[in-house]
Image (cartoon, rainbow, N blue to C red):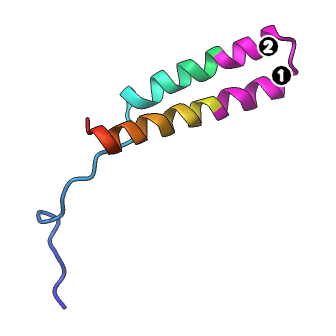
Amino acid sequence: MATKSAAEDPKRPRLLTRSTVLPAFGIGLITAFLADQEHAPFPVGVIVGFVVTGVVIGMIALKKAFYGD
């Protein structure tokens, strides 16, 4: 069975670009700072920051999936 060439494959949009990751990390950093202001232990602030970063990247991915770029 013949395989398709790379020219025939449709281009998939890239998810992890600077326009996606930097705003997500910024929001994650802000939430980690706010957790610190609420006197949460340092590891809790780091975990909250990474979880919020992941959620924001997921929300941006869903937006791109449903509405395009």
Rendered residue at 70%/19% (across/down): 32
- Asked whether residue 39 is drawn in magenta, I would say yes
State the residue lying farthest toward the bottom. 1
Rendered residue at 86%/18% (across/down): 40
Q: Please give left or right for residue 47 compared with residue 52 in the image.
A: right
2 and 1 marks in contact (CB < 8 Å)? yes
- Asked whether residue 49 is drawn in magenta, I would say yes
The dot on residue 42 is: 1
Amino acid on which disc 1 is placed:
Phe
Residue 36: x percent and y percent? 79, 13
Mark 2 or mark 1: name the one nearer the start of the chain. Answer: 2
Q: Please give left or right for residue 22 compared with residue 7 in the image.
A: right
State the residue lying farthest toward the top. 37
Q: Which quarter of the picture shows residue 29?
A: top right
Residues rendered magenta in the picture: 31-51
Rendered residue at 74%/32% (across/down): 47
Circle 2 SS class = helix
Crowd rating for badge 2 (residues with CA inside 10 Å; few <14, some 14–19, many 20+)? some
Task: Work out whether residue 22 or residue 56 is closer to the camera in this orientation and state it.
Answer: 56
Residue 14: x percent and y percent? 33, 44
Crowd rating for badge 1 (residues with CA inside 10 Å; few <14, some 14–19, many 20+)? few
How far is mark 2 from mark 1, CA to CA?
7 Å
Rendered residue at 32%/43% (across/down): 66
Residue 55: x percent and y percent? 57, 35
Residue 63: x percent and y percent? 37, 36
Work out whether 12 lies above or below 26.
Answer: below
Residue 64 in sight in this render: yes
Work out whether 8 lies above or below 37.
Answer: below
Amino acid on which disc 2 is placed:
Asp
Q: Main secondary structure of the magenta part?
A: helix
Q: Which residue is mark 2?
A: 36
Residue 16 in sight in this render: no
